[in-house]
Image (tube, rainbow, N blue to C red):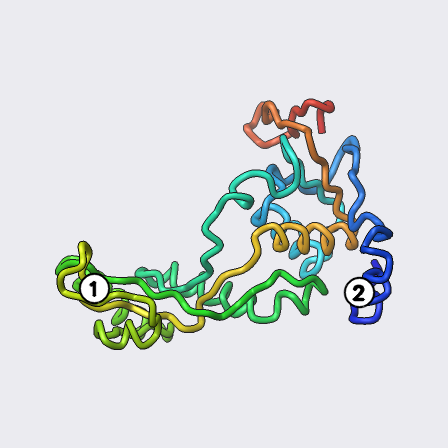
Amino acid sequence: MTRFNALNLVRHAMTGHKNWSAQWPDSQPKAEYDVVIVGAGGHGLGAAYYLAKEHGLTNVAVIDKGWLGGGNTGRNTTIIRSNYLYDESARLYDHALDLWQDLSQDLNYNVMYSNRGVLMLAHNVHDVQSFKRHVHSNRLNGVDNRWLTPEECKEFCPPLSISPNARYPVMGGALQERAGTARHDAVAWGYARGASARGVDIIQNCPVTAIRRNADGTVAGVETAKGFI
């Protein structure tokens, strides 16, 4: 895998970026794999990437009924945060949020991650109580989250109207400043490139139609539009 750097970006810019080689092959399925992952979105490709990188499992196939990143990854809100209420969720998502900080460097692919914060606005008493509960729970788990007054909300987001006559008046807000956003397509592409470079097969336009089981209930393989694996 050729590493991206400023020099080759400038060189390709001179030709209108017309000469880039494919960043991952469009693989055809083999007869068997150690791991088969259904769905070539951020979760599936990320799982394949970390299986290969962290655990040395490279005989892996990621199969999608359509194109890479064409499902939920292609139509999600791109919000990245860890201010979840329950202990288990907070720890899991806070670890993930830490990984996001250096993901572009890890993948050598710009996923366009930006720490711009997530502000959750409270418009009624129930919202105030719920969001303050989140703030206190997050603090107990070591997750950054703080309560803002309406004036502090406007200071963080100047276009915001805090007029008491607004249709949805702002009564405060919970702000996680470490949270942010990323380009969803770039996340899928970066994981695909990194996983493929480590030997993972990415198989597109190949619906999985059934999971075949052995007599004892264990999984024997998957039926696909391109044959049994």
The answer to which image quadrant residue 203 occupies is top right
Give me the residue at 73% from left, 53% from top. Answer: 193
Residue placed under numbered mark 1 in the picture: 170
At x 15%, y 58%, the residue is 124
Tell me which residue sits at (83%, 51%) in the image.
18
Sequence order check: which comes first, mark 1 or mark 2? 2
Secondary element type, mark 2: helix
Q: Quadrant of the C terminus?
A: top right
The spot of residue 108 in percent (x, y) is: 72, 65
| Residue depicted at x 38% and y 63% | 90
Q: Is residue 5 left or right of residue 86?
A: right
Q: Secondary structure at mark 1?
A: loop
Residue at mark 2: 9
Decide if residue 93 is in sight here. Answer: yes
- Direction from residue 100 to residue 180 in the image, left or right: left
Which percent across, then down, holds residue 137?
Answer: 28, 68
In the image, residue 154 above or below residue 92: below
For label 2, the crowd category at 10 Å Cα-Cα, with few meaning under 14, some 14 to 19 and many 20 or more, is few
Residue 213 is at least partly visible in this image: no
On screen, residue 201 versus residue 219, left or right, reads right
Q: Position of residue 131 (x, y in %)?
A: 24, 64
Q: CA distance from mark 1 to mark 2?
A: 45 Å
> Could you say which quadrant of the image residue 190 lies in?
bottom right
Placement of 77 over or under 166, stated as above or below = above
| In the image, residue 219 above or below residue 96 | above
The reply to whether dot 1 and dot 2 touch (C-beta < 8 Å) is no
